[in-house]
């Protein structure tokens, strides 16, 4: 077991760190306030190959794996979690299922455009009545000759406003039990009947785009079906195994930023005649933040490495997300406490980190859903 990053992973980490510190960190507060990310950020990420990180080289990507993506996401999210989730969803929730379940034609058609960032990807699963119970979706896809007609409403779609391509989960067999009658479809923006609905105003990750996506008699061809008919739910779940590694990485990035801010402030801030870092109460917080982050980081790397080996990692990804997301919130809370009143204002970026951390325990499966996934597998032996 080698805990050192390879030369290639070290280079990619340094590239992401450099990009994040130069292009994202100075503007993260602006993206948060304006509730959008400046378009030049996407152009630069495209030039650096970040949109195609996990897309095979034959389709114009960098051909790297989930481990590389995790490392990049930790660095990007350390600087701007809004940009971080945009990149995570693009790579893990759209690039990944096309790579794993797409036909040769689908890969050739979509992956090169996703690799450059010409198209940003989004994942449409959640509906007003189907959040944690994802198999209860009501969006339908009905056959019409060789075509399919999609009708329904998706909510909380990350990248909804930026996306050029959506993977959409819809019920194709109303008679089958919930998870058995769902199929996945690839639907590009501009398809008649597909509209971007309400944009959510959020507590955190405000620069990212979270919208409704509405489907009103949206006609797609047979070539839009991703994977087998009525086998879309396992596609959605397999995709989320990778997505949860991405959100775990986001959580570590936010947690790292909290730890760095806490260390810096506690060395500068003097009370009772000395820096507050000299007090044991502060040192214990720093020790716990650092230890929990390192433990979570190792779990994220394990899940990513397993997925890169082609092994199922549902339990490991859920464990990583459970630990990383709760750790991110722990770190954000302690970091704010160390900053005291100053941390509650927007003079420091701690209040943004505190708001951004919260979502990591909610999206791509809430903390209690991760516990369900873990417990089911542990109990199954
Ligand atoms: N890989 C492959 N197949 C899987 C799988 C996986 N990880 N997990 C489940 N499956 C398969 C099962 O084997 C089963 O297939 P068979 O019937 O053939 O055996 C089928 O899928 C159904 O599985 P379950 O019985 O486990 O399904 P369930 O209805 O009990 O649901 C759940 C399980 C874990 C609760 C699931 O509904 C879930 O993960 N819910 C949370 C949904 C979620 O994370 N939503 C986030 C959406 S994206 C988002 O947040 C916004 C964004 O844009 C970022």
Image (spheres, grey):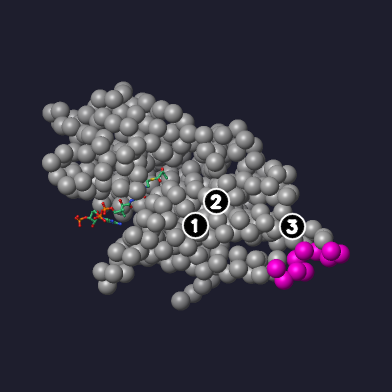
Mark 2 and mark 1 in contact? Answer it, CB < 8 Å. Answer: yes
Left or right placement of residue 44 versus residue 139 in this view: right
Query: Which sits earlier in the primary sequence, circle 2 or circle 3?
Result: 3
Element marked by disc 3: helix
Please say whether residue 309 is one of the residues in the magenta stretch: no
Residue 259 visible in the shown view: yes
Residue found at the very far top of the displayed protein? 192
Q: Which residues are magenta?
A: 272-281
The structure residue drawn at horizontal position 39% and vertical position 51%, both measured from the top left corner, is 365
Name the residue nearer the viewer: 372 or 38: 372
- Disc 2 and disc 3: Cα gap in Å? 19 Å
The structure residue drawn at horizontal position 55% and vertical position 56%, both measured from the top left corner, is 329
Please say whether residue 274 is one of the residues in the magenta stretch: yes
Left or right placement of residue 353 versus residue 95 in this view: right
> Which residue corresponds to mark 3?
265
Element marked by disc 2: helix
> Which residue corresponds to mark 1?
325
Element marked by disc 1: helix
> Which residue corresponds to mark 2?
357
Say few, some or many: other residues with alpha carbon within 10 Å of mark 1 (under 14 / 14 to 19 / 20 or more): many
Residue 150 in the image: state x and y as whole percent: 25, 31
Residue 191 in the image: state x and y as whole percent: 32, 26
- Disc 2 and disc 1: Cα gap in Å? 7 Å
- Disc 1 and disc 3: Cα gap in Å? 23 Å
Query: Where 181 sits versus 268, above or below?
Result: above
């Amino acid at each position: 077991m080698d805990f050192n990053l390879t030369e290639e992973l070290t280079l990619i980490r340094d590239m992401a760190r450099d990009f994040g510190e130069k292009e994202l960190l100075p503007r993260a507060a602006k993206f948060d306030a304006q509730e959008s990310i400046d378009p030049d950020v996407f152009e630069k990420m495209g030039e650096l190959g970040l949109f195609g990180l996990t897309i095979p080289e034959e389709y114009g990507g960098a051909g790297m794996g989930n481990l590389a993506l995790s490392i990049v996401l930790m660095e990007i999210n350390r600087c701007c979690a809004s940009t971080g989730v945009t990149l995570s969803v693009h790579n893990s929730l759209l690039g990944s299922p096309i790579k794993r379940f797409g036909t040769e034609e689908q890969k050739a058609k979509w992956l090169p455009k996703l690799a450059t960032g010409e198209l940003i990807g989004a994942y449409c699963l959640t509906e007003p009545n189907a959040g944690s119970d994802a198999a209860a979706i009501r969006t339908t896809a009905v056959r019409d000759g060789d075509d399919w007609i999609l009708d329904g409403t998706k909510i909380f779609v990350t990248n909804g406003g930026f996306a050029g391509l959506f993977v959409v989960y819809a019920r194709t067999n109303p008679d089958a039990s919930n998870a058995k009658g769902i199929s996945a479809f690839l639907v590009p923006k501009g398809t008649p009947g597909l509209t971007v609905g309400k944009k959510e105003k959020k507590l955190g990750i405000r620069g990212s785009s979270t919208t409704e996506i509405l489907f009103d008699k949206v006609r797609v061809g047979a070539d839009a079906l991703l994977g087998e008919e009525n086998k879309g739910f396992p596609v959605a779940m397999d995709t989320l195994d990778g997505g949860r590694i991405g959100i775990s990485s986001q959580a570590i990035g936010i947690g790292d930023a909290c730890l760095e801010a806490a260390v810096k402030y506690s060395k500068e801030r003097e009370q009772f005649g000395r820096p507050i870092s000299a007090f044991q109460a502060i040192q214990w917080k720093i020790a716990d933040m650092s230890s929990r982050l390192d433990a979570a980081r190792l779990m994220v790397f394990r899940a990513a490495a397993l997925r890169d080996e082609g092994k199922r990692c549902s339990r490991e990804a859920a464990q990583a997300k459970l630990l990383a997301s709760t750790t991110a919130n722990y770190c954000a809370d302690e970091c704010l406490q160390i900053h005291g009143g100053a941390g509650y204002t927007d003079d420091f970026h701690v209040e943004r980190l505190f708001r951004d951390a919260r979502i990591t325990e909610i999206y791509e499966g809430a903390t209690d859903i991760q516990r369900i996934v873990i417990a089911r597998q542990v109990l199954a032996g």
